[in-house]
Image (tube, rainbow, N blue to C red):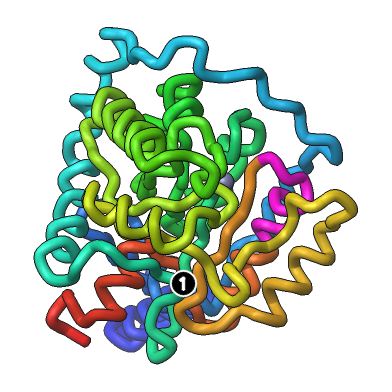
Amino acid sequence: MKYVFLLLAALFIFGLAVFMGAPFSFDTHDESGQAVRSETEESALPEPLNIPFLTEVPEPNNPCSNISVPEEIQQKRSDLADNIAVLEKRTEKVKDTISLSFELEKGSPDIRAVAFTIDTGTGGSYGITELLDIAAYYKIPLTFFLTGCWVVENPELTQRIVRDGHSIANHTLTHLNLADVSDERARYEIEETDRIFRDVTGFTPFLFRKPQYAGGERITTLAGTLGKISIQGYPDFGDTTGWRSGSSKEGVLGRITKHTAPGAIWVFHNLSSSDLSAFEDAARFHLQDGYKIVPVEELIIRLYGLDGER
Ligand SMILES: [Zn+2]
């Protein structure tokens, strides 16, 4: 009799646990030890955060009066070492195997994964903390395309981006249109940004995005000689177009949900109120639809089968 009671009690506790969900869903972890979404979590999303954003995003202050990184910032990068090691491991996988002078618009259509990239444009940190909070809540890794000037202006935020397990990428120093400048100036824009990234994080990005996607093959090749893969977006550059005047949250979401596909690289701007307010719903849409949101490097690794498990 005692055993029957114990059995019933055990069944009741098991049933309750299954009902509650959590105890029997196991988190997996990526190489950095950051939690990534488990299969169970994908089908059951938590309540939305619904963070409010300003309709008028504050104008950036004019960055880049000084592009040297203070010593005390440089010293703080030592606690990023574990996450930088993960970024470097991904870099090596890609660098050793494929030639660098190319432009990527999308990942493999065969794998249900997309990348969410954040472009900081000419400057301004508005919305970045909230995007990081949303990303942490849903455990989704993002890829940040940052200008060197932005990193110099926001070194601690840049370090938090890395600490939170996100990827960082070179978006030139001053966000100028590279189609209009000499090779020498373009090289300076990319190399100075690399130097700033190294000073602030210890990492040299191999992902690169041309401001306004401008500069064509000349800049793709030049970036390749500097060890960079040029990343665009998909389809029609995958840009949400939330930066356009007259854009809206609904317009951005409609564009994303209509056009997204396996391998898509979506480009969000933190200085777009429409992009910021659509971001969480865009993430929920993909997760509910069975997509994984992955760093851009993962799309490349999977596209070329570089992880040996394609
Ligand atoms: Zn940009």
Q: Quadrant of residue 197?
A: top left
Q: Which residue is mark 1?
A: 105
The 10 Å Cα crowd at callout 1, few under 14, some 14 to 19, many 20 or more, is some
Q: Exactly how many numbered labels are in the figure?
A: 1
Q: Residue at (60%, 63%) from the top-left corner?
A: 46
How would you classify the magenta stretch by its main secondary structure? helix
Q: Is residue 283 left or right of residue 42?
A: right
**Residue 148 sits inside the magenta stretch:** no
Which amino acid is tagged 1? Glu
Q: Quadrant of residue 26?
A: bottom left
Residue extending farthest right: 246
Residue extending farthest left: 96
Query: Up-down: is 175 above or below 241?
Result: above
Quarter of the picture containing the N terminus is: bottom left
Between residue 145 and residue 285, name the one nearer to us: 145
Query: Up-down: is 186 above or below 110?
Result: above
Q: Is residue 242 left or right of residue 210?
A: right
Q: Residue 273: x, y in percent? A: 77, 45
Q: Quadrant of residue 106?
A: bottom left
Between residue 290 and residue 260, name the one nearer to us: 260
Q: Residue at (71%, 53%) from the top-left corner?
A: 275
Residue 301 shows up from this direction: yes
Q: Residue at (75%, 67%) from the top-left corner?
A: 253
What element does badge 1 sit on? loop
Q: Residue 309: x, y in percent? A: 17, 84
Q: Is residue 307 left or right of residue 3?
A: left
Residue extending farthest front: 182
Query: Up-down: is 115 above or below 303?
Result: above
Query: Up-down: is 225 above or below 260?
Result: above
Q: Residue 99: x, y in percent? A: 19, 68
Read off the magenta span: 271-280
Q: Residue 269: x, y in percent? A: 63, 48
